């Protein structure tokens, strides 16, 4: 069956309004924000509005062996939503309803197309809070967050997406609809299939509904900023804060990132500093004391400047500077954001390793990230129109994965494997674990039609 015939079949078997065959529109939905990857030519784009339409779409594709590439908002940076030739792209963004906010049981039931920030705003109106908060929360979807087990700035204290997913509705590769998980706080009825689907990047099933834990809104946070003349001093402060207090946020930005943010925002950041450490506490009555302790730790570590504020607006402004790190670097050229994590004591060594990689390959790298849990986002800036610049940037990007493993870390903390990091996975997981993962993929998707080639380069 060719592209035209399959397009006609989709239109006859599915509601015509959810089938898009315009090549330009399809092309616009064939990639994500990753670099180094050229999307293929999908046959169609589908925009189902509910679970039944997803199941019907999967049924048609399964019957004819046509691969499906699920996608959310397309904000991923690891190539998880990059489409290949002859596939169908299935966007969940029309499934954008918040079905339920249950204030008594502290949960929400949402479609995968709901944006993270929209969910946060909706539950905040009820005095509640959804903690996972990627810096891209204004543009990333809950479905994408589930697919990659996304983290965010607050995960140092509150954890990542998996800790907040109670249950899922999933369309399997054979078009069956499966509900996993629960609405209760506790539950160990059988294998933890919910956790299995979280972080699976659409390779095991297509998530069509998510039941999420909520929390009461925390007290307003107090904020500390500290500038350092050396990465070593910043590392000592991060270590001291992590081991002696319980910050709700602990972030770091290096000199390259500081300069990029300041050039864009004119926030009067100290661009002569080697690093900025940003910390918050939301511990209520004890927050001011904790803030003082964090500031004292920064000063003992050699901070050149320390500022403390209990003003929520000032704290939010400083947090904006951190959230703008990636788009600020993007203004300097093409940018590919990496995602490595190391044990807490290795943050300074990881930043140093990234700087050495940047020097070796003669590329510009801005490093920022979640210092409190060792998750860093070194971002390579390059000229995508210069083949030599692209080659050096790609080599630097992949060397960072090896550096993270050498420090006892992981090749990805919250962005997933996608296509970009697939070849590094066995170096971290080992052959036996890869065999096990391939067996799971083979059991749930024996024909390999769900996001083929992502995460693993083979199936059981």
Image (cartoon, rainbow, N blue to C red):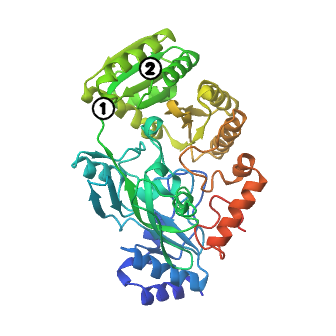
Q: Distance between the residues labelled 1 and 2?
A: 20 Å
Res. 173 in view? yes
Quarter-of-image position of residue 259: top left
* Quadrant (top left/top right/bottom left/bottom right) for the C terminus: bottom right
Indicate whether 77 appears above or below 178. above
Residue lying farthest to the right in this orientation: 431
Total labels drawn = 2
Residue where numbered disc 1 is placed: 316
Q: Nearer the viewer, residue 167 or 143?
A: 167
Between 54 and 336, the residue placed more toward the observer is: 54
**Local secondary structure at mark 1:** helix
Q: Position of residue 392 (x, y in %)?
A: 67, 40
Q: Quadrant of residue 265?
A: top left
Residue visible at 73% across and 57% down in the picture: 434
In the rendered image, the vertical position of residue 126 relative to residue 57, given as above or below: above
Q: In front here: 187 or 179?
A: 187
Q: Quarter of the image containing the N terminus?
A: bottom right
Q: Where is residue 291 in the image (x, y as percent from the top left)?
A: 37, 19
Q: Which of marks 1 and 2 is nearer the N terminus?
A: 2
Residue 2 appears in the picture as rendered: no
Residue 175 position, x and y percent, is 52, 79
């Amino acid at each position: 069956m060719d592209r035209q015939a399959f397009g006609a079949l989709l239109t006859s078997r599915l509601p015509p309004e959810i089938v898009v065959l315009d090549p330009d529109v399809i092309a616009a939905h064939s990639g994500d924000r990753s670099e180094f990857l050229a999307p293929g030519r999908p046959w169609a784009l589908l925009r189902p509005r509910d679970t039944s339409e997803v199941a019907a779409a999967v049924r048609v594709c399964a019957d004819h062996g046509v691969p499906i590439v699920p996608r959310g908002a397309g904000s991923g940076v690891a190539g998880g939503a990059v489409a290949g030739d002859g596939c169908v792209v299935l966007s969940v963004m029309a499934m954008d309803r918040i079905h339920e906010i249950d204030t008594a049981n502290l949960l929400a039931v949402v479609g995968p197309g709901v944006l993270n920030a929209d969910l946060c705003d909706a539950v905040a109106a009820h005095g509640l809070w959804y903690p996972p908060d990627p810096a891209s929360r204004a543009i990333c979807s809950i479905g994408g967050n589930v697919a990659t087990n996304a983290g965010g700035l607050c995960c140092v204290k509150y954890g990542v997406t998996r800790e907040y997913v109670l249950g899922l509705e999933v369309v399997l590769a054979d078009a069956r609809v499966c509900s996993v998980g629960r609405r209760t706080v506790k539950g160990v009825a059988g294998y933890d299939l919910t956790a299995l689907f979280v972080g699976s990047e659409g390779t095991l099933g297509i998530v069509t509904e998510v039941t999420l834990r909520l929390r009461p809104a925390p007290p307003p946070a107090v904020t500390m900023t500290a500038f350092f003349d050396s990465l070593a001093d910043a590392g000592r402060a991060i270590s001291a804060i992590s081991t002696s207090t319980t910050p709700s946020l602990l972030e770091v930005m290096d000199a390259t990132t500081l300069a990029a943010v300041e050039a864009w925002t004119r926030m009067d950041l100290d661009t002569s500093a080697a690093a900025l450490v940003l910390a918050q506490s939301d511990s209520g009555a004890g927050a001011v004391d904790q803030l003082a302790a964090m500031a004292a730790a920064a000063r003992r570590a050699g901070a050149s400047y320390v500022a403390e504020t209990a003003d929520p607006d000032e704290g939010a402004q400083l947090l904006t500077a951190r959230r703008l790190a990636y788009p600020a670097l993007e203004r300097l050229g093409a940018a590919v954001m990496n995602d490595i994590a190391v044990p807490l004591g290795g943050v300074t060594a990881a930043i140093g390793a990234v700087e050495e990689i940047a020097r070796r390959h003669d590329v510009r790298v801005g490093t920022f990230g979640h210092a409190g849990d060792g998750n860093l986002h070194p971002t390579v800036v390059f000229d995508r129109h210069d083949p030599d610049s692209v080659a050096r940037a790609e080599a630097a990007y992949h060397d960072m994965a090896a550096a993270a493993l050498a420090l006892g870390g992981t090749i990805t903390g919250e962005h997933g494997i996608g296509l970009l990091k697939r070849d590094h996975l066995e170096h971290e997981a080992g052959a036996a674990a890869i065999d096990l993962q391939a067996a799971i993929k083979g059991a749930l998707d024996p024909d390999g039609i769900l996001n083929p080639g992502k995460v693993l380069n083979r199936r059981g």
